Amino acid sequence: LIIWGSDIQDFDILQLEKEFPNIVLLNHKAVNIIEKSFVFDHYRAGYMAGQYLIDHGHTNIACITGWFDTADANERHKGFLDALKDNSIFIHKNLIYHGDYTFKKGFEGANYLLNQDESFTALFCANDQSAMSAISALSIKGVDIPNDVSVLGYDNMNISSYTTPPLTTINVPDQKMAISAARKLINLCYGATLEVDYDFGIELIERKSVIQ
């Protein structure tokens, strides 16, 4: 059994594991079965995103979030804000738009941010879908990406390299995590000894949506 998601309570997972010991978790870290957990460090990835924008000269930074019902969303956002805080940069509350990872909210969020009195030169989006639709909304309003506003995504979807301009983004190694989880499950079910990786490094994919 493979379970995906960070919004499941550890108690429920442990109860399930008692009934079905051949279980692995994707994008969830359960302390009592850490050897069956395959997770990505969303806090460090969010921090990297914030630091990258700062390193590229941005101090007025806006953000389109995802929903905060899951641990990974909160970790990502906290890492991003901590990077700004550690550089004595504080994002204005009007420059944080609460999205839901959809194209629609990314588009609406970009228009909302443009209508605020506070200006921004960079926009961090909690996923690539939001970032791509934000680029569309900004471009329609005559904003030049990345010369007027830099846009940074998160996930590294296959389509992200085909936007205009191609999207700079944080890579989330979903495929690598899934392969390792499947190998672990095979080992549990059949006593195999397939190699299992627990180290999923953080990588920022530089393309053309952040000014250099």
Image (cartoon, grey):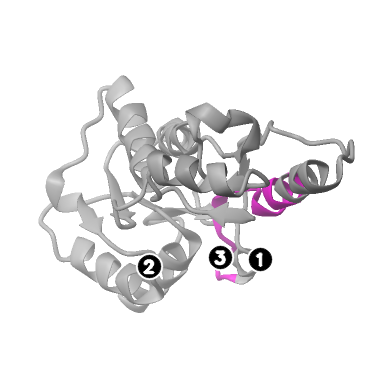
Q: Nearer the viewer, mark 1 or mark 3?
A: 1
Q: Which residue carries the number 3 mark? A: 165
**Does any portion of residue 177 appear in the rendered image?**
yes
Q: State the image quarter where residue 71 is shown.
A: top left
Q: CA distance from mark 1 to mark 2?
A: 17 Å
Q: Which residue carries the number 1 mark? A: 158
Q: Nearer the viewer, mark 3 or mark 2?
A: 2
Q: Which quadrant, please, contains the C terminus?
A: top right
The extreme front residue here reads 19
Q: Which residues are magenta?
A: 163-180
Determine the residue positioned at 37% across, 44% down.
9
Residue 178 in percent (x, y) is at 69, 52
The mark that comes first in sequence, 1 or 2, is 2
Q: Which residue carries the number 2 mark? A: 134
Of residue 24 and residue 146, the one placed in the foreground of this image is: 24
Circle 1 packing at 10 Å, graded few (<14), some (14-19), many (20+), is few
In the image, what residue type sits under mark 2?
Answer: Ala
Q: Nearer the viewer, mark 1 or mark 2?
A: 1
Magenta residue check for 103? no
Q: Which mark is residue 39?
A: none
Q: Is residue 180 left or right of residue 53?
A: right
Q: Is residue 64 left or right of residue 27?
A: left
The mark that comes first in sequence, 1 or 3, is 1
